[in-house]
Image (cartoon, grey):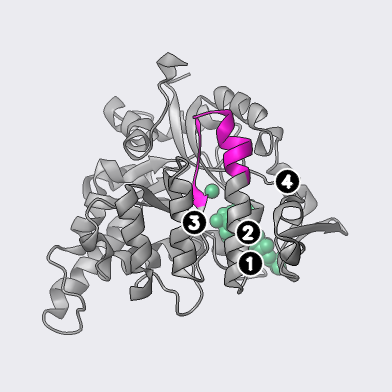
Amino acid sequence: MTSLVNSADSHVLEPVDLWQRELPPSMRDRGPVTETTDGREIVYVDGTVVRRDPVAFMEAIRPPGAHDPVARLTDLDGQGIWAELIFPSRALWVHLSGDPALQAACCQVYNDWLYDEVMSRSPRLIGAAMLPVLDTADAVRELERNVRRGFQTVFLPTATPEGREYNREDWQPLWAAAAEAGISLSFHIGTGMDPVVYRGPGGAITNHVVSFYGAQTTLCHLVASGVLEAHPDLYVSFVESGGSWLPAVMERMDEAQRQYGTFFLRPRLPMLPSEYVRRQVHVSFQHGRAALAVADITGLDALLWGSDYPHLEGTYPNTQAVLADIFDGVPDEIRTAITGGNFARLFAVPDPAAA
Ligand code: MZD
Ligand code: MN
């Protein structure tokens, strides 16, 4: 087994009755509720169906480690993964709710459970605190509440409701709070919207490609509206987005800034968009070598590997074979940066030697 790696992307499975148990009585059945009928697992948020999956598919992405932290650490050891950044499963659908108070309460319930039942088991299990997106003050409160107890990053969706696009001024208190706290922003793709955009023949492949568009749009909003200019120490990660598209977006943002000259540009950035990306942006990928091919343009620091445990789009249970394939013939310093060092620059990782 090659040296231990760190994963920038994994998912934890929340108890099916978490929100029914923990939400305030007035909201009890309005959080994510799961029902299994006719071989399908249906998720409701606030009484609306937000997801329908074949039970067999959901069972395929739920090894014991998905919900049991002890089994999770055993799986990590078996895959050669030391530390990992954890995102939700059932809670992902909370961002589809249109009620600010419900979103805020559901995020609090998830973050409390993640902290008490998962992160508390090992410093190798690094949770991203999920933030509500309908009201900035709610998001700031939840960020600060979780930073106080040691969360190192927050999870935001790559899609937001109309009027809540990330370039809007009313998001600025959240960026300032994250910068002030010295934590990073982690945007996981396929979230904040129904990721099933197309149906019928070829739909699954098309949807899988389309699922990274939100990362590209969010990146442009944060760079072009001046968020990274205003907060030069604020790190931003796009999780499960793949990385090979990053130079294309860098180049197109630079082209717009260069070519529009004195027209249209608001704000006028003192640096090229691509310079902010190289300074502050990271992307995670699971498979493939395309991201390696762009490291000269993105900067090696931008690239993070992630297992996406336990999803089918991830590398479990064949992580070492996948890593051997990705990094076959790749210099050690590049492999160790992408599979561990860059992660350790973003997050406090316990020392394996001290374990
Ligand atoms: C978290 C999102 C990622 C994606 C969406 C999927 C493939 C489909 O039968 P039909 O003609 O009506 O066609 C339906 C179709 C087969 C086209 C459709 O059901 O595309 N199914 C799975 O939903 N893909 C794009 S990929 O959104 C980011 C990556 C794959 C896993 C993903 C779907 C996960 C995520 C993320 O929110 C979830 C979750 C708990 O695990 C999976 C499923 C569910 C959604
Ligand atoms: Mn993922």
Examine the rendering and report whether any part of residue 187 can be seen. no
x 70%, y 41%: residue: 62
Q: Nearer the viewer, mark 4 or mark 2?
A: 2
Instruction: Identify the residue under disc 1.
Output: 102
Residue 270: percent from the left, percent from the top?
A: 12, 66
User: What element does badge 3 sit on?
Assistant: helix
45 magenta-colored: no
Q: Amino acid at mark 4?
A: Pro
Mark 1–mark 2 distance (CA, rounded to whole Å): 6 Å
Work out whether mark 3 precedes mark 1 in sequence or the reverse, and give the earlier one.
1
Which residue is more in the foreground, 177 or 164?
177
User: What element does badge 2 sit on?
Assistant: helix
Which residue is more in the foreground, 124 or 36?
124
x 19%, y 66%: residue: 254
x 78%, y 48%: residue: 56
Would you call the spot at circle 3 few (<14 residues within 10 Å), some (14-19), or many (20 or more)?
many
Segment tinted magenta in the rendering: 113-129
x 43%, y 53%: residue: 144
Instruction: Identify the residue under disc 2.
Output: 106
Instruction: Identify the residue under disc 3.
Output: 142
Mark 2–mark 3 distance (CA, rounded to whole Å): 11 Å
Mark 4–mark 3 distance (CA, rounded to whole Å): 21 Å
Disc 1, ligand 1: is the CB inside 8 Å?
Answer: no
Mark number for residue 93?
none
127 magenta-colored: yes
Work out whether mark 4 precedes mark 2 in sequence or the reverse, and give the earlier one.
4
Instruction: Identify the residue under disc 4.
Output: 15
Which residue is more in the foreground, 333 or 281?
281
Residue 22: percent from the left, percent from the top?
A: 71, 52
Work out whether mark 4 precedes mark 3 in sequence or the reverse, and give the earlier one.
4
Would you call the spot at circle 1 few (<14 residues within 10 Å), some (14-19), or many (20 or more)?
many
